[in-house]
């Protein structure tokens, strides 16, 4: 609508205030709103900013325009309940290599990923050109095992601005978050050791644990994190030799550990002197402007091994990540092989130029806009009684359908060419057979809507009474 950057920031600020008033009960469904001209005068903004604000609210389902009547607070659909986290007693188990979906299945609902928008793509191209010009003789040498100082300094500065201060010398650059996690496991465990994980747990982590011949103890999920009392029980008994947890916007369950949970997790690691690997690949993908702090922020003794990457926030194709190994730094860096120099320099430039911070702001805004559209569609088209996670960040929704045969759904989806992840992939137990996970990282447009329609149709047929 021709809105400049200032106007864009203003209309979104006004929209967020409006949504906050509804959530706080200051505005109720059916309340009549000011006309566009009245609203513009009241707020001291241009008419185009007022139009953009109302259009934003309407697209998100908070406002409805009635012909010849005006604008009204939209009736809210009954919110679906979140998944049930049934308690269970955690025990030693052996992970199995999860079933791999055929490579031909690569739809928008399957893999947890974003679509890279053109503004960021163009900024990345500029960063690569500048990096190539500045690289000089560094392109004639093998990359340093710890990583380029320029990238480590850029990352340290970036996270320092988020309140998580660190020294560039603490970081090691690697080939993505999974590579960082695997190296950390190799450093602090031996085959046959047991690793505590959340339940459900990302299937890629289960696969790595199986490859390394490690056993697992699944710790139950709670609404605010995981059952830390059970974790401490196993730490006290010496049942587990390490922990591996995604702590913010968990995949697949969407939970973020509370500040108290993250603090206690770090305290437990230090008290029992047991390494805890923190998979923090979703940290910066909140659906609001605030970025939470990791458990590593509360670590005083270096027992929390913090891992992250750009694979989820920017692009999986770069396969670039980092680790802050803490007290395990020396054996960790000895295993590092180095990452292509030009890639590191380009991404350092991308961060230092401010393009990465701008990209994250746009991405968080897009996810905040996508999520209610996905949720609204699912609530309207899934059978009654379904439960859907309500994450405040990340790229996935966890869906629980009472009575669903997840294995049958998986087979039917594969036959239909539909890319999804069923609950059985995320555990070594018999739990979550009535669950599935979908990605919400793509715009809610025709390809996504077509896949959701097919998915809901399959679930509806399986849930229909005989």
Image (cartoon, rainbow, N blue to C red):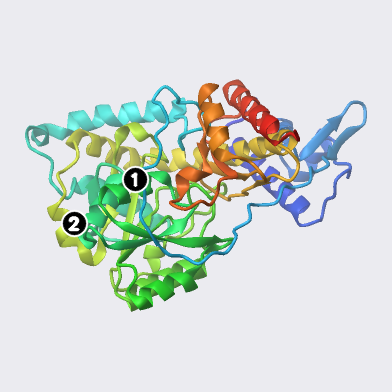
Q: Residues within 10 Å of mark 2 (few under 14, many from 20)?
A: many
**C-alpha separation, residue under disc 2 versus residue under disc 1:** 21 Å
Residue at figure coordinates x 74%, y 47% from the top left: 79
Instruction: Report if the CB atoms under discs 2 and 1 are less than 8 Å apart.
Output: no
Residue at figure coordinates x 23%, y 47% from the top left: 173
Residue that carries the numbered disc 1 in the rendered image: 207
| 214 lies left or right of 35 | left
* Numbered badge on residue 384: none
Q: Is residue 274 above or below residue 317?
A: below
* Quadrant holding the C terminus: top right
Indicate the position of residue 87 as horizontal and vertical percent values.
57, 64
User: Residue pushed farthest front?
Assistant: 466
User: Residue pushed farthest right?
Assistant: 69
Indicate the position of residue 218 as horizontal and vertical percent values.
44, 60
As rendered, which of 420 and 80 lies closer to the eye?
420
Indicate the position of residue 185 as horizontal and vertical percent values.
26, 56
| 145 lies left or right of 25 | left
As rendered, which of 150 and 266 lies closer to the eye?
266
């Amino acid at each position: 609508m021709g809105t400049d950057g200032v106007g864009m920031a203003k209309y979104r600020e006004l929209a967020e205030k409006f949504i906050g008033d509804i959530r706080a009960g200051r505005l109720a469904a059916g309340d009549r709103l000011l006309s566009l001209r009245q609203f513009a005068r009241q707020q001291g903004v241009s008419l185009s900013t007022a139009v953009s604000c109302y259009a934003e609210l309407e697209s998100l389902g908070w406002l409805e325009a009635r012909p010849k009547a005006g604008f009204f607070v939209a009736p809210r659909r009954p919110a679906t309940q979140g998944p049930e986290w049934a308690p269970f007693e955690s025990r030693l188990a052996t992970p199995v290599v999860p079933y791999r979906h055929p490579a031909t299945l690569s739809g928008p609902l399957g893999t947890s990923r974003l679509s890279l928008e053109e503004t960021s793509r163009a900024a990345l191209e500029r960063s690569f050109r500048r990096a190539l010009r500045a690289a000089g003789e560094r392109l004639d040498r093998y990359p340093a095992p710890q990583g380029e100082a320029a990238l480590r300094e850029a990352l340290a500065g970036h996270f320092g601005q988020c309140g998580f201060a660190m020294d560039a010398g603490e970081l090691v650059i690697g080939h993505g978050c999974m590579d960082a996690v695997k190296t950390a496991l190799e450093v602090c465990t031996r085959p046959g050791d047991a690793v505590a994980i959340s339940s459900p747990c990302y299937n890629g982590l289960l696969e790595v644990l199986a490859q390394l011949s490690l056993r697992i103890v699944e710790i139950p999920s709670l609404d605010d994190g995981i059952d830390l009392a059970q974790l401490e029980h196993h730490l006290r008994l010496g049942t587990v030799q390490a922990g591996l947890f995604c702590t913010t916007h968990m995949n697949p369950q969407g939970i973020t550990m509370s500040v108290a949970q993250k603090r206690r997790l770090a305290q437990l690691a230090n008290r029992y002197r047991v390494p805890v690997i923190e998979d923090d690949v979703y940290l910066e993908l909140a659906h609001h402007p605030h970025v939470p702090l990791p458990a590593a922020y509360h670590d005083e003794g270096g027992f929390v091994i913090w891992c992250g990457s750009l694979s989820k926030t920017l692009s999986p194709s770069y396969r670039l990540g980092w680790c802050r190994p803490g007290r395990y730094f020396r054996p960790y860096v000895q295993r590092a092989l180095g990452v292509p120099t030009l890639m590191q320099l380009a991404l350092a430039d991308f961060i230092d130029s401010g393009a990465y911070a701008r990209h994250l702001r746009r991405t968080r805004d897009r996810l905040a806009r996508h999520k209610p559209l996905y949720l609204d569609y699912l609530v309207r088209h899934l059978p009654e009684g379904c439960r859907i996670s309500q994450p405040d960040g990340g790229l996935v929704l966890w869906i629980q359908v009472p009575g669903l045969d997840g294995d049958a759904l998986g087979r039917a989806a594969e036959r239909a060419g539909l890319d999804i992840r069923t609950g059985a992939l995320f555990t070594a137990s018999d739990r979550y057979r009535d669950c599935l996970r979908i990605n919400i990282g793509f715009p809610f447009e025709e390809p996504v809507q077509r896949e959701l329609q097919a998915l809901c149709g399959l679930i509806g047929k399986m849930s229909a009474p005989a």
